[in-house]
Image: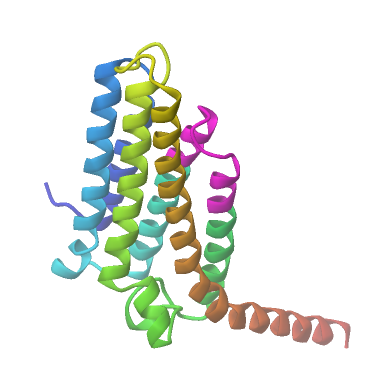
Amino acid sequence: MFWTPNKVTALRVLVAFLAVGLFGRSSPANLAAVVLTVSDIALNADHGQLPLQKQLATPLAAQIDILGDRLIEYTFFTYFAVVGMVSLWLPVLFFTRGAATDFLRSLALKAGYSGWGASAIEQSRWARALVGSRPSRALYAALKCACFCYLGLELALTHGPVALLGTISSETHLAMRGIAQLLTWATAAFCLLRGLPVVLEGWRFLAREAAAGRVRKSVETA
């Protein structure tokens, strides 16, 4: 089967849905969900090189890749918020950041820019390093992997009637919760940091669109 970037993105989203669907059903299902979560992040790491290796990188593929990342992040964080393992404000933060950056990217796309390569919305060197460089992408993927897998393991070990550990001491519970909070908010902070260049450099497209709208309005009323 010929794997294209878009097919890999679709597979990643399906794996994420399957993983979240398994959480909380039984102890084996919880562990299987953690394995699927690791597989999903691994697909993301390999997926980043596929377009370059097969010369399939296109602006549309880049946008679909970003959409896939959003769906996966939203799926995991919403689930963990629903079961009470993270704050409800965490998925809200990711929703807001994603909506803002995707809106600015859509304006940049109309102006001939894309989400990757030399025509990316991020033009300065520091912005490219923070958003599109391999170390930045790898660190963000590692944070998400650690966050999702830790929360999944914590759920498998301590939450609900299918918990593997059953009753644990309050000290152990507080320590596990502290690590979870550290991982989730570190992931959120790096997510916001990576979105900052898009907001700062994408603002000019919003100003340009607003100026063009004023010109069209003045022409129509003239």
Q: In this view, does 128 lie to the left or right of 12?
A: right
Of all residues, the one furthest to the left in this rendering is: 1
- Point 29% across, 44% down: residue: 12
Q: Can residue 22 be seen in this view?
A: no
Colour scheme employed for the rendering of this structure: rainbow
Q: Which image quarter is the C terminus in?
A: bottom right
Observer-nearest of 197 and 10: 197
- Point 43% across, 85% down: residue: 123
By secondary structure, the bulk of the magenta-drawn segment is best described as helix
Residue 81 lies, with reference to residue 121, above or below; the image says: above
Residue span colored magenta: 75-95
Point out residue 129 in the picture as x, y percentages from the top left corner.
35, 78
In reply to whether residue 145 is colored magenta, the answer given is: no
Residue 85 lies, with reference to residue 161, above or below; the image says: below
Point out residue 131 in the picture as x, y percentages from the top left corner.
39, 71
Q: Is residue 109 left or right of residue 213?
A: left
Point out residue 100 in the picture as x, y percentages from the top left corner.
59, 63
Q: In this view, does 206 lie to the left or right of 164?
A: right
